[in-house]
Amino acid sequence: MGHRVPRGLDGGATSQKRQKVVHEAPTSEEVHASRQLQQLLSFSQDPARARHGLQSFKLFLDQLLNQDSKDADRPRILRDYLQSTKPADNDENPVYLPDIMQTWSYGTQINNENIMSAVPVVLALLLKLLSQSLESVPFGLGICRTLLQKRQQELIARNLSADKGKSFIISPTLRMLTEAVIFDGGAIAKPLFRARASMLKSLARNMGLVHRGDEAEDTKRPSARTNAVLFFLSALKFLHPEAKKELLSQRDIVAALTRDVKQDPPYLVKELLEGLRAHVLLDDKLPREAKACLLNASTLTRLSALYQYRLDTPADDEPSIADIAHEFLMAACTSPGCGLLRQDSGFYPRELDPNVPVPTAVVDEWGLEVIVWMNKFRTETPVRNHALSNFLPNLRPWSSLKQSELMISIFKAAPELVAHYFLNNKSFTFEPKLSATWTGYAAFLFHTVTLPIPDHFCRGPNFPALPPPTSIVVDNILPPPLNPKALSRSLASKSNMISFFATRILVVALEKLDAALKMHRDPSHAHKTAWAEAARRLVDEFRQRCPGLTEMINAYRSVPEGDILHREAASRLLRLCYEVLPQHALMAKFDVSPFLETSLSRLSRQELEDPKDSALSVKELENLLSIAGYSPGMRWFAAPEGVSLSPFTRLLKVCVDAPHGVALGTIREVLNFVAVEEGLVPRVDAHPGLLALLEALQVLRQSYPDSITHVWPFLDNCLARYANSPVKYVEKFYAMKDEAAEPAVQGLTSADVSLATIAMLEQLPFAAAKEGNQHTLKALGRFLPSFLGYLAAAGESKSLLDLVFSKMVPYLPDSKKKVKAGGVPEGLEFQHNPWPSAKAIEAGKASSTEAPQEEGKSSPAIDAKALENMLHAPDGLEADNSALVRWSSKTVDELVDDGYLKSLIALLASEHASIRKEALVNIRKAAAKIKESEYEEKEQIWLLLMELAETAADNINDRPLPSPTSAFACHAIDVLRDPLSCLYPKVNMFLVRGPSWSPDKIHLVDDILEGDPMVPNTYYTQTNWLLGYLIDGLRTKHDLELFHKKRTMGPLLEHILVSATNPYMRWPLKLQVLRLLYRATCIEGGSTTLTTRFGIMSWLEATQAGCTDASEAAVYETLRKRIWETSDQDRVRAWSREGLNGPSW
Amino acid sequence: MAPPQKSDQQVAAEFTSYYLQRATKEFAEDLDKVRSADDFKNDALQIIVSALQQGTTMFSPEEQRRIVTAAARPANKA
């Protein structure tokens, strides 16, 4: 290694160390005359003299610009000076201020930086001054044009590209250019831009010359960057669109513009944002591409850093920089006109054609599998809005309200970005943690879920032919961070707030799912099968991401008693599960009664002091009531253990004792619904239903508050007795009707008096006979006449009510014969309940007497498609050959609960003998596996499978197992795995009857329709199960033969039709019967068999005539039409001897 | 004379205030824990308030009116 060579003998003289530049302050003198000015500014090769002149001129201009100094001579001196230096008019290239220009040129030539700086300083000041007066504009323009001359351009370029440290040269030059470009309304902006090679020289670099130092930038001494940005903004303001486009395409300049924006002084940031907004975003003439050059992801990201800008201290009424930046970004990212936002197609990813022609037959046969892109977007989705998609990950919506608002607005404007964002940003999870960040993230996700679904999924005027990819729809309903694990942990969290937030998100998600499903079921779809399948997939995928109902129930259970807001949300979530996912909700076996009980008790005790709390509590009760309405096992009239009154009566009590101001409309509706369904009150539109009872109770409470407490037990007893055996009271009613010799029914069609009165009449003697019951009888003496009076006012038969009353009177305390003399009061008005007056009843009467004929004509017609939607049930025994292998890898729980066993059983009805045989072997294997397992109901399931195998073994080689037998086995599994099922005893008894079943019989029909229900109040539930399995069991011609085969109780279908004439059968159950008939019409020859063997046309006609609801009548009507159309019409004509002859449908 | 009916805006404002008051009461303990968490700074308070009150959107204007106006009647009765 060599020795270091000394730098020089004389040391300091040749030192390479940069010498400190010392700026000597120039001398100056005060200007008194234009001639003096001329002399001062005349060209001199002496730099000191030149600086002396320029500095004197600068001070002179400063004084002129200073508003405070009022020296009238100075403007004149300047004017004279300018006049004296004005070039000749005929000069081709006139040079204004030739001496100054020459000095500048000389200064540059000798590299005198002081002169290079001083000239632009005076020119900037001079232009600024000249722009203030109209008469001096020509001089100013002359100077500007002089600057555009080649020589001056070179000087400007040289100044602009001075070393980085020479801001004292760069800044004044930029100020001079700014003054030039804005002079006279931008008169020379265009030529100035044309000379951009010089004028914009090093602009990007100069934008990077930021203020250094700890203190904030002094507004009087702006940095080179500040001057450069101001020059750029001035140019933007006055340039025409083409030039602006060219300017914005200078990538280095655009990039430098915002690179250091975070450190800029507040006024500059404000000007920058306002300038860009006014002259780029909102400039309609500027082409979209030009705007896009500015609004790229990195610009947006840098501007978003202004959310954390801390250098400003805005006054109270002023917006902060963060506010202004937010407003800018909101406009830039969400307005289609601002160039950044591109129109997407909603839930359909880019480059996808949802209207690609696919033959309907192909879709119907293969389903969504034929659409290649349907499963393609699970991990990645292409988008049109690239810039926005790159920008979004830089935002932190969980820690800033404004950023959250911006992001949600972007999602709203470009729905395609929701799935894309969450698929590409997986680092942030929803793992529950009681922190501000988690709370912010939960709030952001809540907002995301509440975003509306784009119109027709694609933002277009109509639905596309094919549905959107299911994964994208689900990503929008439950974004991927909301995975089942995180949601379950949140629901089960010990922190109530975490559980509350998760509950709310699930509530809005279910509401959104409901909306999406409705859109999938829109009648206008071209490929209905595809949309229906997509809807099924949507539900399946949603369920995979959503915690199970059991977890939601547990979450509801663990909400503290007093947390009514939380309880309301949790109960609402459960209600939505029942409404949106009914099949799955009903499988969870949720017994709502205890919760209903708790809620009722709380309301009855009236322990909530704030009426608002009571009102909120009523919301929870309403949710529970809705769940109770959906639960088939709800026992409305049975009092739970340890409680004296049934839920129904307790609800009545809640309505009557309602805390002040609490609206109970929904509770009344539910009560009325139950009362009508149970037949307590007549099912007639003109009848006010349960309101008469409520009114009578409320009047009693008001007049005799003590009496009402004695009425409840009596009323509850009557209602419970009625509910247990309604038929008994129907018979009593008919007997009484005969006794009263009541003429033909007027007004009310299905009943003349509420059957509740008959029950009361029956129970009154027992109440009277009871010792120590005087208070009750006294109360009843007040209540019963008034109740009957309200029933009469509601339009019920007065003569029958009189008869009921006369039979009641002997048991009522009536020492002065006042009660007897009073009779049933007439003309009572409903005061507490918003039901109306006699006029409406009269109107009701009038319309209902004319009804039967009129209704038939005006009933709302439904078309064949609507009928299909309503009555077509999917094939429950559809063959899926893969079931043969899939079951073996599953656990026993999965086999039984997830339908693998059923798929296997369904294969016994396959057309191919080999499949059937294979299925039989597998069923036996599965039975053995189940028997060896720890499954709770293994014995019964094993027995069922072995008996089924035994039944099938004999004939399986020759023909498929009849569908009813397979369907029975499938449905029986559901019963056996639920020991609480009302059919559990019956199915078990059936299984122990023998080792095999008769394959050509349809099982359990008579046991259900005719036998003892074994579990009280479950006749209809059992019938519903039976119809479900019969619908699945009716698939072929051979199956239909079994339905009309002779039996001791008459052909099966006949038996079903007779049961369906039961006036108390509810519409959903009747619909099941109609579904069975519809299924028969889908089988070849089915409609003809229905008509000729069962007289189905007359049955439908008669049932339709008995309908009080026009929409129900329309269903019967359309079904008749379908049967006619699908039958062998010639044969039917001949059979009916032309009685059925293509009616006038 | 019946009191004048509240405008939708009034109802929404009153309901939001009630909802927040209810939520802060029910989750007081948890809110204290959030306040003492490390990340409780800058906008955190605003975010939590906004997060709590966003649940008001789950109630329709009619439901909000029902709950808010439930308060008015006892005063009349008394």
Image: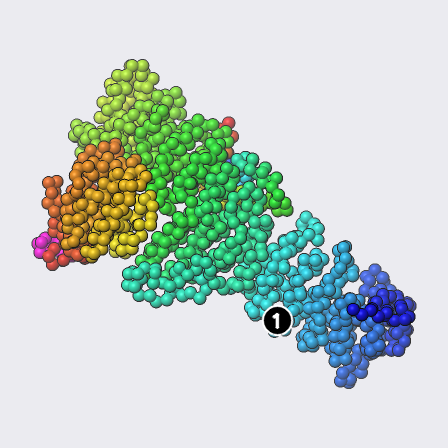
| Residue depicted at 40% across the width and 25% down the height | A702
| Residue depicted at 15% across the width and 56% down the height | A1085
- Quadrant housing residue A975: top left
Residue A958 shows in this picture: yes
- Main secondary structure found in the magenta portion: loop
Name the colour scheme.
Answer: rainbow
Q: Is residue A910 above or below residue B28?
A: below
Compared across the picture, whether B5 is left or right of A819 comes to right
| Residue depicted at 22% across the width and 22% down the height | A807
Q: Is residue A186 above or below residue A684?
A: below
Q: Mark 1 = which residue?
A: A249
Mark 1 lies on a secondary structure that is loop
| Residue depicted at 61% across the width and 57% down the height | A304
Q: Amino acid at mark 1?
A: Ser
Which span is picked out in magenta?
A1133-1142
Residue A665 point in image, percent of width and height: 39, 37
- Quadrant housing residue A866: bottom left
